[in-house]
Amino acid sequence: MNKKIKHNPLVIVLVEPSGAINLGSIARLCANYEIAELRIVGNSCDPDHPEARKMAIKGKEFLEKSQKFDTLVEALADCHRVIATCGRIHHGTIPIETTEKALPWFMETISTKPIAIIFGRESRGLTNYELQLAHKVITLNSSANYPSLNLSHAVGIVLHEVYQYKNKAKKVLSINSHTLSSPKQLNDLILDAKELLLGIGFLFEHTANARMSKVKSLLNRAEIRPEEVALIRGMLRQIRWALSSNKS
């Protein structure tokens, strides 16, 4: 008898949401679409705000049980696969994908760890640094004359597409899906490499962040695994040791 494969618990991560009405509406959507957990980065909006609770209807439990984090890295620490949302169609060094391409990859996995979708601030979305913490970045097609969507509307559209694909994915889950490095693991690697490359003169302070952003995008596209991150960090440690030995 084939064992039933259970989908990963889906987590919604909101970065510094500012509107209580939007927050309440998103909590309601979490109930509508069977989301496992709502996580909030920053203290810009109170889940106990009366307007948030009023809009949540049967999603009040998501407000009550929502977890707060100081940083996005902390909010994503246990997540197996991460997608970020972006209002821009083109983004230079960060590849932007459609939901049709990203969601099959996002859902076809058998890991028991959570998967997460990140949504940015109502005013300015996610920073480049925050976008690069995700394995993939998606955008929603809308009118070029006015492409900006209300936060709760964007969450609703994405969750609708996720839910539609979830039912299809039950029959096509990939048994070959592998565990990707977590956002924290990859971020720590980039910081470690940046420090070494600055020390040997390969990078310069004024261009270091931009160049390391390209490296991080490359590693995300390669879907680097935790053991591969460990291998590279081991190489960095050995290089440091060799450099210090030569100096003595």
Image (cartoon, rainbow, N blue to C red):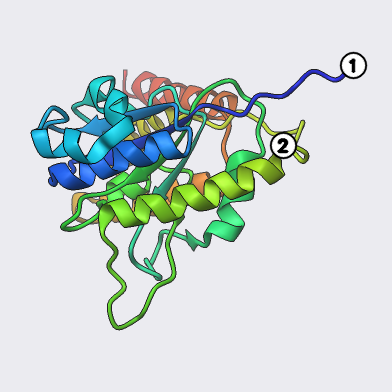
Dot 2 alpha-carbon crowd within 10 angstroms: few under 14, some 14 to 19, many 20 or more? some
Query: Could you tell me which secondary element the residue under label 1 belongs to?
Result: loop
Residue type indicated by callout 1? Met
Residue farthest to the right?
A: 1
Say which label, 1 or 2, has the lower sequence index. Answer: 1
| Residue indicated by mark 1 | 1
Examine the rendered structure and indicate whether residue 174 appears above or below residue 87: above
Examine the rendered structure and indicate whether residue 100 appears above or below residue 184: below
Q: Quadrant of the C terminus?
A: top left
Residue at mark 1 to residue at mark 2: CA–CA distance: 16 Å
Q: Quadrant of residue 147?
A: bottom left
x 26%, y 36%: residue: 56
| Residue indicated by mark 2 | 170
Q: Is residue 52 left or right of residue 241?
A: left
Disc tally is: 2
Q: Is residue 215 left or right of residue 14?
A: right
Relative image position of residue 23 (x, y in whole percent): 22, 41
Residue farthest to the bottom?
A: 145
Q: Is residue 128 left or right of residue 160?
A: left
x 34%, y 81%: residue: 144
Relative image position of residue 243 (x, y in whole percent): 38, 27
Residue type indicated by callout 2? Lys
x 48%, y 32%: residue: 34
x 51%, y 44%: residue: 219
Relative image position of residue 57 (x, y in whole percent): 28, 35
Which residue is more in the foreground, 54 or 243?
Answer: 54
Tell me if residue 4 can be seen: yes
Say which mark, if any, is on residue 64.
none
Q: Quadrant of residue 184?
A: top left
Q: Quadrant of the N terminus?
A: top right
Tell me if residue 194 can be seen: no
Query: Could you tell me which secondary element the residue under label 2 belongs to?
Result: loop
